[in-house]
Image: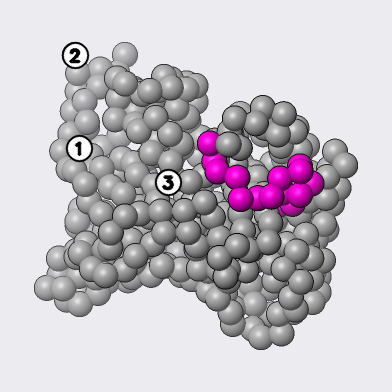
Amino acid sequence: MQQAYPCYMMRGGTSKGLFFLAEDLPEDTKKRDQLLLGLMGSPDSRQIDGLGGAHPLTSKVAIVSKSIRDDADVDYLFVQVVVDKAQVSTAQNCGNMLAAVGPFSIEKGLVTAGDSHTDVRIHMLNTGANATARVETPETKVNYQGSAEIDGVPGSSAPIFIDFLDIAGSSCGKLFPTGNAQDVILDVPVTCIDNGMPVVLLKAESFGLSGAESPTELEANEALKDKVEAIRLSAGKQMNLGDVSNKTVPKMSLISPALHGGLLNTRTFIPHRVHEAIGVLGSVSVATACVLKGTIANDLVKKTFSESAMAIEVEHPTGQFTVEMEVSDSHDIGKFCVKRAALLRTARLLMRGEAMFALK
Ligand code: NQM
C-alpha cells in the first residue's frame, strides 16, 4: 500500500526538488534511498512515475532537521537522485537547493522568524561546512516575492543572501587537493580545486572548442564527453575522492575568455549532463581559481588581484553568476586563504503536501 510522506517542493536558485524533515523519512539509509528513488521515479530517463524533473538539476532532495550544534540552527543533507540509474549520492553538496533551506526551516517552525528578516545558520552535513542565509520575513512570514533576479530563472523574487565562511577543502580536505595550482592530466592542463565543490577546470581551447557552445551541442559531442570523463576519473583519484565512476563529483568546468563583460566564461559538466547555468559552490570554486596566481583560470583572465575584497563575475550558458569574496595572499598557493564567499540566490515554495510511495 502507498504511504504518505509530508513534503514541500521548492525551487532553490536554479535547481528544484523535494524538501523533507529528517523525522518524516526512514532512519535506515538504505530504506531512505529506496524511498527517494521511488518518489522521484528513478531509474528512468523521463522519471515518469515520480516527481523528479528528468534532469540532474530537478532531481534533488534536501533533508532538514533542527541542529544540536552551537554554531547552527539547522542541519541540511543534500541528496542527488540520479535520473537514469538506481543511485543516490550524498557525496556532493548543493548550494542552489541550500537557498531554499532557510525558507523551508522557517515554514516548518525549525527556526523562529524575526519580523523583518531571519538569519538561518545552516550546517551542511555533506561537507561539514556552515552557511548563513538571510531570508526576508516581514511580520514573521517568509516572503517569496521581490525584485531580485538571478540568471537562469525567469522573473524576480525576494533576495536570499548566502554567506559561506569555511568551505575550502570541503570534500577533498584541501583547497588545492593535488597540492598544485596546475596539473597535466592525460596531456591536458587542468586546475583541481575545492572551495565548496570539487571542480576540475579545463580550457575549452584544449578540446578545440570556443567555450561558447550550448549545453546541447556539448552533450552531443561524444568524443569530448569521453575525454572529459577520462580526465575526471583520473582527477578524482588525485583529488582524494577515490573512484568517482559512481560519484557526481568532481564537476568539470570548461573555461574560456569572457564574452559578456564577466571575468571568464564557463560550461560545466555536472558531471555528465551540462549545467544550464553553473552550481553555486561550483562557481565559488571557479571564482577562487581565477584569483590565485598559477591556476589555468588566472592564466586565462590575465589579471593580478591585489585587493582583498572583490566581486567575480562568472559567465555561464544563461547569464552570469556573481561571487563576492574576501581573500588573502593571492600570490602564494601556500598561504592563500579565502576568508569569506557570499552570493545572492532566490527561492520559492512551489507545493506542499504529501508524496506517495509504497516502500517494500
Ligand atoms: O555547486 C549542480 C546546482 C548544482 C550544484 C551540480 C550546486 C553547487 O546548480 O553548489 O548548486 O553541480 O550538480 O544545483
Can you say whether 125 is above or below 356 in the image?
below
Disc 1 crowd, CA 10 A, few/some/many (<14, 14-19, 20+):
some
- Please give the range of residues in magenta: 199-216
Q: Where does the image place residue 282, in percent across and percent down from the top left?
A: 57, 54
Q: Where does the image place residue 159, in percent across and percent down from the top left?
A: 31, 68
178 left or right, relative to 10: right
Disc 2 crowd, CA 10 A, few/some/many (<14, 14-19, 20+):
few
| Distance from mark 1 CB to nearest ligand 1 atom below 8 Å | no
Q: Where does the image place residue 238, in percent across and percent down from the top left?
A: 79, 44
Q: Which residue is mark 3?
A: 77
The amino acid beneath tag 2 is: Met
Observer-nearest of 13 and 100: 13
The amino acid beneath tag 3 is: Leu
Please give the label number shown on residue 187.
Answer: none
Disc 3 crowd, CA 10 A, few/some/many (<14, 14-19, 20+):
many
Residue 214 belongs to the span the image colors magenta: yes
Q: Which residue is mark 2?
A: 1
Query: How is the model colour-coded?
Result: one colour
Q: Which residue is mark 1?
A: 6
Q: Is residue 320 visible?
A: yes
Q: Quadrant of residue 213?
A: top right
Q: Which of the marked residues, 3 or 1, is nearer the chain's N terminus?
A: 1
**Name of the residue lying farthest toward the left:** 139
Quarter holding the C terminus is top left
